Amino acid sequence: MDGRIVVAGASLAGLNAAETLRREGFTGELVVVDADPATPYDKPPLSKQVLAGTWEPEKIVLPAARPDAGLDLTWRLGQRAVGLDVAGRRLRLEGGDELAFDGLVIASGAAPRHLPGTDGIGGVHVLRTLADSLAIRGAVDAGASDVVVIGAGFIGAEAAATCRERGCTVTILEAAPVPFERSLGPRIGPLVADLHRDHGVDVRLGVRIDGLDSDPGRDGNPVTGVRLEGGEVVAADLVIVGIGVAPGVGWLEGAAGITLDNGVVTDATLLAAPGIVAAGDVARWPSARYGELLRIEHWENAIQMGEHAGRTLAAHLAGDADAALPYDPVPWFWSDMYDRKIQLAGRSGPDHDVEVVIGATEERRFVALYGRAGRVEGVLGWNRPRHVMQLRSLVDTPTPWSDGIEQARALA
Amino acid sequence: MRVVVDFDLCESNAVCMGIVPEVFEVRDDDFLYILQENPPEELRSKIEEAVRRCPKQAIAIED
């Protein structure tokens, strides 16, 4: 296989696609484009070790970007893709350059949502890139000590934990009355808030934000507080906004031949258009397992989906489209806060039945099953990695709810 | 082939155990144990997958 493949996004998904294309025998030019000028890096440590100051950026360079990777990639870092001509097989870059391609991997990730009206206020940050993480770390290094995290999501909660461990006063503000309800349901979700409270974090639920107060005359972090509806002001010299992300599809708007609907919609094999695949946070594909379109923002999915997209593209370039297989993994993610490791295989949500099958929630070391329609759909562990991995099979293979509970209890 | 784990990095996510239970085992103490330091060649592709999917990039293969 020869020619040129462009990978739009030096992300975990994009680089795993590139690596896979080489493994599958692609010998042509592989060009990786990304607006981020930094050497491609792994993102989970950005809210943990990098933010904590215990790891330097060199330590999180992705394997494919290391000098000894031997993948012969052509880097176009710090260059933003701004347009795509599907029929003409060209990608447009900011500044006017165009890259013709034989194959394209769309792996442009997602971008954090900003709080309206807060752009340009010093001391207000999102957390997505290495630059974001270093900016927050730098603010704490420089003495910021009143941290307010807006939004109780996993990234914000991890950042809150890290800032707390660095000695900051931390407040989490969440609009929903029940924390983590959408991701973990009304029974388990509140345990995450309790974990933070145990460590001295002020977690406020059901609050609405009116705006930010700032003192433009103050150097570094002009933000002085977060104003709540009702008039109360929570003092802050560092605000971290963690209210979710949106798929990075701005550059694809109007690209005829690409379907955009909460991400780039692909077929079951991750093909978005002839010779174009998509993977990672930006991609939405029809999952046979769940009978719906899924877009997953997890680390492991980025790896597996990138690899799968690479195989699909290799099959098409080799003229063997039938070799492209459907993508249908069981989602898995983890989150580390303080000394707890939360892991979930499968799916969980507010409408699932929940059964604690190993340990007890009071110990903060347990396994819970999530079920829906009489079947096991998710396995959640708090400091129970062995059992989560052993019980992942209950989700892999459809298992009746009562059988799943019985099998899980037998492991205890 | 020799499997090496950097135990300073390992956080016992147990992903490797899910992929190659013949080689990796996380026990009830939450620590990872290597069951075979010199596994047979036929496990290579699965071990390579475990290397790629380790959340801490803590596993390496030394030939």
Image (cartoon, helix red, strand yellow):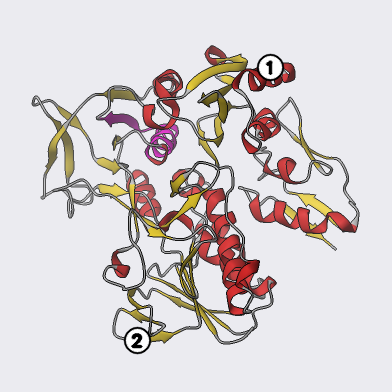
Circle 2: is it few (<14), some (14-19), or many (20+) Cα within 10 Å? Answer: few
Question: Which mark, residue A397?
Answer: none
Horizontal side of residue A340 vs A144, given as left or right: right
Horizontal side of residue A127 vs B18, given as left or right: left
Q: Residue A396 location in percent, x, y? A: 64, 38
Q: Is residue A257 visible?
A: yes
Q: Residue A387 location in percent, x, y? A: 68, 28
**Which residue is at a point 61% across and 27% down the rendered structure image?**
A383
Secondary structure, mark 1, is helix
Viewer-proximal residue among A120 and A342: A342
**Which residue is at a point 88% across and 45% down the rendered structure image?**
B36
Circle 1: is it few (<14), some (14-19), or many (20+) Cα within 10 Å? Answer: few
Amino acid identity at mark 1 = Glu
Q: Which residues are magenta?
A: A156-174
Q: Residue under label 1, please give it.
A: A406
In magenta stretch: residue B52: no
Q: Residue A74 location in percent, x, y? A: 53, 81
Q: Residue under label 2, please give it.
A: A97
Amino acid identity at mark 2 = Asp
- The quarter holding residue A202 reads top left
Horizontal side of residue A327 vs A386, given as left or right: left
* Image mark 2: chain: A
Look at the picture and state if A31 lies above or below A139.
Answer: below
